[in-house]
Image (spheres, grey):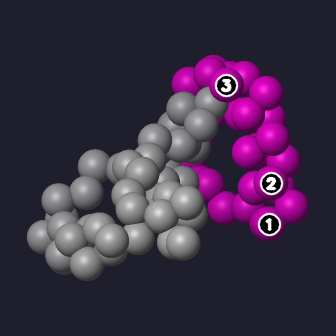
């Protein structure tokens, strides 16, 4: 894995849960979807920071400063 962003840290959680060692993490969309389903069945999810659409500029500025711990996810209820 290159980096520990949204996909990377979830991949590490999967590896830990199933006792896998990862040397190279490259998969098709189909294989990735299967891994996500497998992880969801074990309660493995991505860590996120939920933001409102009104915080999008702040989130972008934080990204530029590398001040992001988890993946940003926009709360769609804030769009209305």
- Residue at the disc numbered 1: 29
Looking at the rendered image, the quarter that the C terminus falls into is bottom right
The answer to the question of whether label 2 and label 3 lie on touching residues, with beta carbons closer than 8 A, is: no
- Residue at the disc numbered 2: 33
Say which of marks 2 and 3 sits in front. 3
Q: Is residue 11 above or below residue 66?
A: above
- Residue 57 placed where, x, y %? 25, 78
Membership of 31 in magenta stretch: yes
Region of the chain picked out in magenta, as a range: 14-43
Residue 10 visible in the picture? yes
The local crowd at label 1, few if under 14, some if 14 to 19, many if 20 or more residues have their Cα within 10 Å, is few
- Quadrant location of residue 18? top right
- Residue 61 placed where, x, y %? 18, 75
Alpha carbon of mark 2 to alpha carbon of mark 3: how far? 15 Å
Q: Is residue 34 above or below residue 26?
A: above
- Side (left or right) of 63 relative to 17: left
Numbered disc 3: secondary structure: loop
Membership of 45 in magenta stretch: no
Residue 5 visible in the picture? no
- Residue at the disc numbered 3: 43
- Depth check: 41 or 25 in front? 41
Q: Is residue 75 above or below residue 53?
A: above
The answer to the question of whether label 1 and label 2 lie on touching residues, with beta carbons closer than 8 A, is: yes
Number of marks drawn = 3
Numbered disc 1: secondary structure: helix
Numbered disc 2: secondary structure: helix
Residue placed at 39% from the left, 62% from the top?
Answer: 52
Residue placed at 21% from the left, 71% from the top?
Answer: 58
- Residue 32 placed where, x, y %? 75, 55
Q: Earlier in the sequence, mark 2 or mark 3?
A: 2
The local crowd at label 3, few if under 14, some if 14 to 19, many if 20 or more residues have their Cα within 10 Å, is few
């Amino acid at each position: 894995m290159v980096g520990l962003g949204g996909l990377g840290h979830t991949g590490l959680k999967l590896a830990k849960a199933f006792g896998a060692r990862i040397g190279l993490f490259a998969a098709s969309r189909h294989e990735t979807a299967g891994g996500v389903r497998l992880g969801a069945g074990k309660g493995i999810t991505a860590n996120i920071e939920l933001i409102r659409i009104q915080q999008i500029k702040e989130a972008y500025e934080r990204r530029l400063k590398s001040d992001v711990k988890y993946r940003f996810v926009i709360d769609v209820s804030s769009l209305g």
